[in-house]
Amino acid sequence: MRCPKCGGQDDKVIDSRSSKEGATIRRRRECLACEHRFTTYEQIEHDPLMVVKRDGRREMFSKEKLLSSLQRACQKRPVSEDDLASALERIQEGLAESVDRETTSRAIGERVMRELRKLDPVAYVRFASIYRNFEEATDFVSEVERLGSLPIDDQRQLELIAESEAAAKAKRSP
């Protein structure tokens, strides 16, 4: 690792810690030449995910494109950047767990719609209108009616699950 201060390549690791729930290792280093201390992060490098588009083209998955789509759908809505970042992370984790190297744009779109439905119903309908190519006002009406007929996630249930997971994690930690 090259020192950011002097450019030296000899260093020693002072401290290593797991971060982001074990997905990343944080290392504190000290340059042996100038004694400058700096931090590096190490994470697993995944094979690139390829997305098969509707017309059959293949392109690399782009986290930036996905975030841009989420931001556009949530524009001028009461959705925080942290909520968007969390949704983006859940979508990526779900894709990493369920597919090996290739997925369809349809599968990504369905995951995005599930996340947006939880975040904001208006953002969900905005995204759905583009994703499903709404052409008439009746398309919007039928989607809103469908959204109204779906069961609403019970937030209290989700909070209880999160609390029990946190308690179990605390028990495992020394």
Image (cartoon, rainbow, N blue to C red):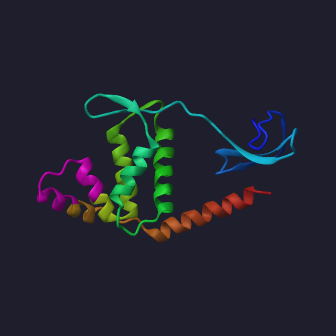
Apparent side of residue 59 relative to residue 126 in the rendered image (left or right) = right
Total number of numbered discs in the rendering: 0
Quadrant of the rendered image containing residue 102: top left
Apparent side of residue 156 relative to residue 35 in the rendered image (left or right) = left
Q: Position of residue 39 (x, y in %)?
A: 74, 47
Highlighted magenta segment, given as a residue range: 126-143
Does any portion of residue 16 appear in the rendered image?
Answer: no
Quadrant of the rendered image containing residue 4: top right
Does any portion of residue 43 appear in the rendered image?
Answer: yes
Q: Is residue 61 above or below residue 83?
A: above
Camera-side residue: 121 or 152?
121
Camera-side residue: 28 or 171?
28
In the image, farthest residue toward the front: 6
Quadrant of the rendered image containing residue 61: top left
Q: Position of residue 73 (x, y in %)?
A: 33, 57
Camera-side residue: 9 or 154?
9
Q: Position of residue 121 (x, y in %)?
A: 32, 64
Check the picture and name the quadrant holding the N terminus: top right
Whether residue 139 appears in magenta in the rendering, the answer is yes
Check the picture and name the quadrant holding the C terminus: bottom right
- The residue under the point 48% across, 61% down is 81
Q: Position of residue 65 (x, y in %)?
A: 40, 45
Q: Main secondary structure of the magenta part?
A: helix
- The residue under the point 36% across, 51% down is 69
- The residue under the point 36% across, 66% down is 152
Apparent side of residue 169 relative to residue 143 in the rendered image (left or right) = right
- The residue under the point 18% across, 59% down is 140
